[in-house]
Amino acid sequence: MGAKLTYPKLALLALAAAAVIAALERFIQPQPGGTLLLTMVMFLGIAEGCVALMAAAEIAHGGWHLPMRSRMLAAQAMIPVVGLLFVVQSLRLEIYPWFASNGFWLNRDFFIARHLVLIALVFLAARKFTADALRGLDSRRLWAVIYALLFVIHQTVIGIEWVMSLERPWFSTLFGAFFMVSALLSGITTGAIVLFFWRGRFDDKLRLAQKSIGGLMFGFATFWAYFYFSQLIVIWYGNLPEEVGYLAKRIGYHTPYWAVARLAFGLIWVIPFAVLLRRKNKTNPWVTMALAFTILTGFLLEKGLMIHPVAPVHPVAVLLELGIAGFLFVAIMRGGEALLPGRGAAPVESAAASSVTN
């Protein structure tokens, strides 16, 4: 299980990680780039996606998630860690073309303030939902709905303001929803990894959860591909230079990124779709765990493709920063039970899980 991780310990680890990352940003990549932005987008999507998956299961009155609920909800502790990394990133906002302007919405101070507020609101809603869910209170479904709404809003804003505004004035009305679906799929894939590594053996209590995760991975990978195709076909069919330019820069055969773009699409959808067409593979934890890492690798390439052409991602810095953030996330997921509110309801949750599997 690992040692218990308390918030004071996590705060110290997060501060140390932020200091190291700030140093990496200064010395390895002196010119402002998108390395830290890529790290933040990846781990914020995973953390919020894990909680969103549990919230969706509560809203749908599902029972499959109960054996893994506390483990997945521990991911909410990563949200304020990303908030701290955002403070570091806020020192290097020159990567945005609107940085020098002083508009009402896109200006430095308001940008920083509203995103810190949004991160705080999402985290507090996740904490309240977690507390009520682990205590077995009826209000957990109300807070599940509130969190789900905040999740949709926040991931949409992240996609539009953190990433899409790098190419201002280019815009896409589907871009925010595309990010939201990616974050939810990231949470589903993390669930597959949690199911695999949580238990020394794969027992009966997790069979329903495994089957559900496999089905959700198949469905939402296809849903992601639908959003990808919908955005691509509308822009390409319209053939407007101000819209096509964004895609041409990233997926055209004349660019150095065309192979990366196709590899990312293959990792996120083609391979999972082909493998999970077979029903037996959905219930095989080895298969879903391997596909989870495949999809997350695809997302890393996809987000890098969005950011790197305009805000260069340093290969050494990104490996180090992803490693540091990944270490914190694994520490939270393995030993973060003390970070969960409402832990006094563990017997209630265990009883509910047992009733589902009997």
Image: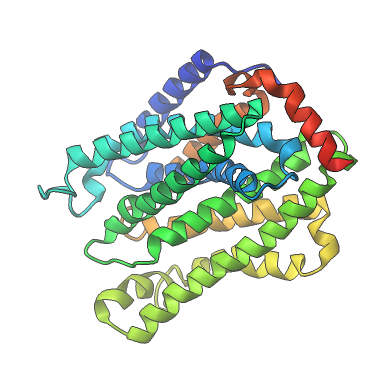
Residue 124 drawn at (x, y percent)? 44, 30
In screen coordinates, is 214 left or right of 130?
right
Question: Which residue does the image show at 70% across and 56% down from the upper left?
Answer: 291
Question: Which corner quadrant holds the C terminus?
Answer: top right
Residue 227 drawn at (x, y percent)? 49, 69
Extreme residue toward the top, this view: 8
Residue 99 in view in this figure: yes
In the displayed structure, 250 sits above or below 42; it is below
In screen coordinates, is 72 left or right of 63?
left
Extreme residue toward the front, this view: 138
| Front one among 15 and 334 | 334
Question: Which residue does the image show at 58% across and 35% down from the upper left?
Answer: 140
Residue 306 drawn at (x, y percent)? 40, 60
| Front one among 213 and 348 | 348
**Colouring scheme applied when the structure was drawn:** rainbow
In screen coordinates, is 312 left or right of 293?
left
Residue 312 in view in this figure: no
In the displayed structure, 229 sits above or below 98; it is below
